[in-house]
Amino acid sequence: MTNGSKLDQPEQSSLNAEELEGAIRAIVVERDLQPGDRIGAERELATNFGVSRWSIRRALEKLEEHNEVLRTHGRSGGIFVAPKRLMRATPVVGLPQYLRTQGVESGTTVLGTRTAPPNEEAARQLELEADAWIFHIDRLRLADGLPLALESAHFPCDLFPGLLEKPLGGSLYEILETQYGVRKGAAVEKITAIAANREVAGLLQVSVGTPLISITRTTTLDSGRPFEYSNELYRADRTTITVRSDGETAHTSIDA
């Protein structure tokens, strides 16, 4: 009877931790891998170097600390060259615009849409009566093909008839501005930290319990009426938040 799995037991190897880190860096150089490219999986790296997955994980943890690699989980997970750091700043614009200006390819998977009455919090944030109806739009946002954020947005039906019939894979703000004449006023964002539950972890390709950055936003028209209430869950391993205040105006930026 053994005291632990082979995965958990360190093995004797000709490569120490620093040498393994260097060997993984060498793969990136030799294959001319770019940010977002896949390096491999823990198991295949361990096999290639003749070490245990425990040893590989130790090396990857160090590389991840220095933002050299990014690890994702799930069916399409693996070890990737760390993507570029991305900037998100106020005033709020669509995520594709942020990514486009930084040379990063954006992507969106629409997870679901529906029309339904608002819950108590959405009704309060959007200043709606209990008998009002809103559009719900749930999307997974990608940066260079890797999951970045999970987004749930809510909009009053009376302001945007036919919204769910529009192409929802790009910037919702662009749709609202160009097709509904929206002129944004103020946006208030509440930033907190939460742990990924099983459903969210699967979508963002992280482990259950992984820290996420939660951004809840209410945005108004220039007339002062709220038109958007949304929540975004960002992968904390790809996101750094900086808040800057200039006089009476506060700006929030996110390096993702």
Image (spheres, rainbow, N blue to C red):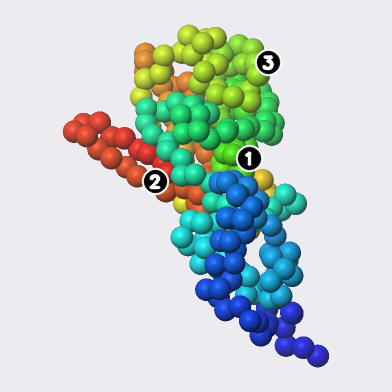
Q: In the rendered image, which residue does mark 1 sit on?
A: 145
Q: Mark 1 Cα within 10 Å, few/some/many (few <14, many 20+)?
A: some
Q: In the rendered image, which residue does mark 2 sit on?
A: 241
- In the picture, measured across the screen, residue 27 lies left or right of residue 100, that is right
Instruction: Evaluate whether residue 117 shows in this view.
Output: no
Gap between marks 3 and 1, in whole Å? 25 Å
- In the picture, measured across the screen, residue 218 lies left or right of residue 76, that is left
Image coordinates of residue 147 in percent, x first then y, are: 61, 43
Q: Which circle's residue, 1 or 2, is located before the other in the chain? A: 1
Asked whether 19 or 84 is in front, the reply is 19
The residue under label 2 is which amino acid type?
A: Ile
Contact between marks 3 and 2 (CB within 8 A): the answer is: no
Image coordinates of residue 141 in percent, x first then y, are: 59, 36
Contact between marks 3 and 1 (CB within 8 A): the answer is: no
The residue under label 1 is which amino acid type?
A: Gly
Q: Which circle's residue, 3 or 1, is located before the other in the chain? A: 1
Gap between marks 1 and 2, in whole Å? 22 Å
Asked whether 3 or 187 is in front, the reply is 3
Q: Nearer the viewer, mark 1 or mark 2?
A: 1
Asked whether 29 or 215 is in front, the reply is 29
Gap between marks 3 and 2, in whole Å? 34 Å
Image coordinates of residue 247 in percent, x first then y, are: 18, 33
Q: Residue furthest right?
A: 1
- In the picture, measured across the screen, residue 149 lies left or right of residue 255, that is right
Q: Quadrant of residue 218?
A: top left
SS under mark 2: strand
Q: In the rendered image, which residue does mark 3 sit on?
A: 165
Instruction: Evaluate whether residue 156 shows in this view.
Output: yes
